[in-house]
Image (cartoon, rainbow, N blue to C red):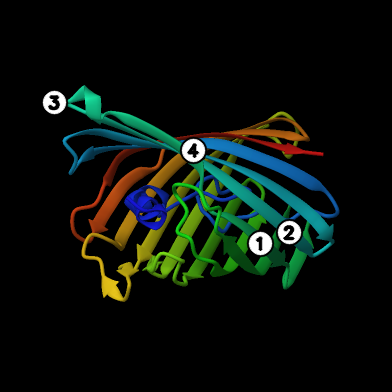
């Protein structure tokens, strides 16, 4: 299997690849904006696939992200995801394998076009642009793609609402493979449980997200691939715990509620995400 086709083979697992989220845990476009501050975020997302395969398949996505608040309204994000693919055969253990490689990285720039602060809250509207850069690894698509997003966030303590939409325009890689253009859309609601009276540290938040992704069919040397593209929709309950002003821990369990994928593709059955964010 070529480099590009290997990347396509785990396309269903990466269709809703998480980004660096603030309040959102799973959504790819909820990237954090800081004022001249740096944040490091890393998490582990495990997706299990038990349908459409004679055995078990698991992907483990471990992105490393650095967010830099370059100016008061501008942030830059750098992402490098490490991906592990595990496959276990029921009838023939000799066919079991595990592959680990860096998937394609990305660079994003986000600007707060609307920035309104009020007591115990704020409203933001932020366009974002980015470029996906091929890593050359086993899960790389081999193409340089352009990403555009719009993010709206509205916080009135103890409630927060965040919505975003993101479009990825793909190009053709060196081996003739072009993964289909992709559209992500997300809505997240956050509620502060602790402290019960006003803002403070430590803090505990409940998060519920709806995460959707639509991808067009891929093409290989101009020919559409039947087993590619489609739609995935997740409902993702989660929690965020902030023990200090500089550290945040997060957990989410995306539940697949829509898996309308074209052809014979891996379909996720269960997912888990555990992450940490460190501000310094």
Which numbered disc flags the more N-terminal residue, 2 or 1? 2
Q: CA distance from mark 1 to mark 4?
A: 25 Å
The quadrant of the picture occupied by the C terminus is: top right
Q: CA distance from mark 4 to mark 3?
A: 36 Å
Label 4's element?
Answer: strand
Which numbered disc flags the more N-terminal residue, 4 or 2? 2
Residue shown at 50% from the left, 65% from the top: 143
Which numbered disc flags the more N-terminal residue, 3 or 2? 2
Q: Are marks 3 and 1 in contact (CB under 8 Å)?
A: no
Label 1's element?
Answer: strand
Q: Is residue 249 left or right of residue 206?
A: right
Q: Which residue is mark 4?
A: 238
Query: What label does residue 91 carry, if any?
Result: 3
Residue shown at 43% from the left, 53% from the top: 16
Query: Which of pointers 4 and 3 indicates the residue nearer the eye?
Result: 3
Q: Which residue is mark 2?
A: 76
Q: Which residue is mark 1?
A: 108
Residue shown at 53% from the left, 55% from the top: 28
Label 2's element?
Answer: strand
Mark 1 crowd level (few <14, some 14–19, many ≥20, 10 Å Cα): many
Q: Is residue 162 left or right of residue 155?
A: left
Residue shown at 78% from the left, 53% from the top: 68
Q: CA distance from mark 3 to mark 2?
A: 48 Å
Query: Which of pointers 4 and 2 indicates the residue nearer the eye?
Result: 2
Can residue 196 be seen from the camera position used here?
no
Specify the farthest residue to the bottom: 222
């Amino acid at each position: 299997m070529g480099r590009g086709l290997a990347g396509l083979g785990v396309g269903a697992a990466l269709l809703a690849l998480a980004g660096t989220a603030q309040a959102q845990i799973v959504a790819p476009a909820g990237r954090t904006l800081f004022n001249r501050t740096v944040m490091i975020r890393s998490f582990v997302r495990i997706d299990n696939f038990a349908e459409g395969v004679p055995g078990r398949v698991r992907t483990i996505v471990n992105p490393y992200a650095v967010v830099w608040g370059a100016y008061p309204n501008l942030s830059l994000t750098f992402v490098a995801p490490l991906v592990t693919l595990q496959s276990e055969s029921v009838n023939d253990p000799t066919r079991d394998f595990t592959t680990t490689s860096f998937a394609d990285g990305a660079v994003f720039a986000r600007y707060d076009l609307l920035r309104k602060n009020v007591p115990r809250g704020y409203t933001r509207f932020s366009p974002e642009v980015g470029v996906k850069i091929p890593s050359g690894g086993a899960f790389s698509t081999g193409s340089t793609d352009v990403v555009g997003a719009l993010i709206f966030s509205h916080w009135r303590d103890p409630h927060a609402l965040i919505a975003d939409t993101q479009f990825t325009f793909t190009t053709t890689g060196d081996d003739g493979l072009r993964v289909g253009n992709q559209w992500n859309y997300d809505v997240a609601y956050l509620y502060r449980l602790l402290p019960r009276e006003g803002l403070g540290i430590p803090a505990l938040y409940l998060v519920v997200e709806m995460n959707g992704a639509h991808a067009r069919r891929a093409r290989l040397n101009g020919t559409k691939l039947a087993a590619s593209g489609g739609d995935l929709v997740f409902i993702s309950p989660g929690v965020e715990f902030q023990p200090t002003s500089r550290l945040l821990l997060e957990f989410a369990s995306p539940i697949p509620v829509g898996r309308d994928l074209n052809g014979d593709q891996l379909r996720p059955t269960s997912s888990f995400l555990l992450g940490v964010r460190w501000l310094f």
